[in-house]
Amino acid sequence: MPALADYIKTEIINGIEYDMSPANTNHIRIQRRLSRIIDNFLRGKKCEVFTEIGVTLDENNYVIPDLLVVCDPQKVTEQGISGAPDFVVEVLSISSKKKDRATKKDTYERFGVKEYWIIDPKAESIEVYILRNGKYELDGVYHNLDESEIDFKHMNESEIAEIKLSLKISLYDDLEIQTKDIFEG
């Protein structure tokens, strides 16, 4: 497999190097769908969406998020992004799950990324973390569920409120994304 042998992407987090494995097909589809939704929304706005672009946070931290949004055009350089993005998404894989949920989450929090999504393709869920007073708070967990299979009449208001089928990026109140549009082609 010469193509795989040539694939080398490395992140540096807290001075430690991490080699990245190539993404699988489902990972790429999820990334592409979300990127398309956000890119269409951002047309004519100052923010810009990127996928798999290098982000230099400082001399000891260089990451390659699956998807990100930058609203400060001065952070966009020919070499990638210089400084913390406003919004970051990581799509979990077997090899990245621990790093995305802990190491990268802590790093994004420390550098002031305003919003961080962790997408779990297997569970078809999205964890949304919002930076408040310098710390990430879990804003919600959103699922890809078939509404026709949910028995709303036998649920109380609090149970219904926990079922979250659409979500918004905190940067934009008028962009509502249906979870099914991220997970289903």
Image (tube, grey):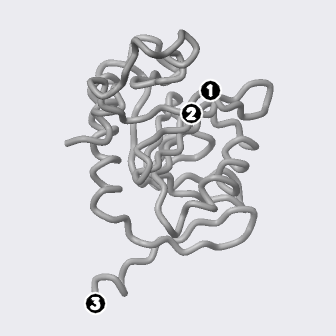
Report if the CB atoms under discs 2 and 1 are less than 8 Å apart: yes
Label ID, residue 128? 2
Q: Quadrant of the N terminus?
A: bottom left
Q: Nearer the viewer, residue 67 or 153?
A: 153
Q: How far from the left and from the top, in percent, is residue 141?
A: 54, 33
Please indicate whether residue 140 sits to the left or right of residue 184 in the image: right
Please indicate whether residue 58 sits to the left or right of residue 96 in the image: right
The secondary element bearing badge 3 is classed as loop
Q: Earlier in the sequence, mark 3 or mark 1?
A: 3
- In the picture of the structure, the residue carrying the numbered disc 1 is 139
- Tell me the amino acid under the disc marked 3: Met
Please indicate whether residue 181 sits to the left or right of residue 90 in the image: left
Q: How far from the left and from the top, in percent, is residue 96?
A: 54, 64
Q: Residue furthest front?
A: 154
Q: Residue at x 56, y 33 (%)?
A: 128
The secondary element bearing badge 1 is classed as strand
Q: Residue at x 26, y 24 (%)?
A: 148
Q: Residue at x 75, y 62 (%)?
A: 14
Q: Residue at x 27, y 51 (%)?
A: 29
- In the picture of the structure, the residue carrying the numbered disc 3 is 1
- Tell me the amino acid under the disc marked 1: Asp
Q: Nearer the viewer, residue 57 or 106?
A: 106
Gap in angstroms between the C-alphas marked 2 and 1? 5 Å
Q: How far from the left and from the top, in percent, is residue 111?
A: 71, 42
The secondary element bearing badge 2 is classed as strand
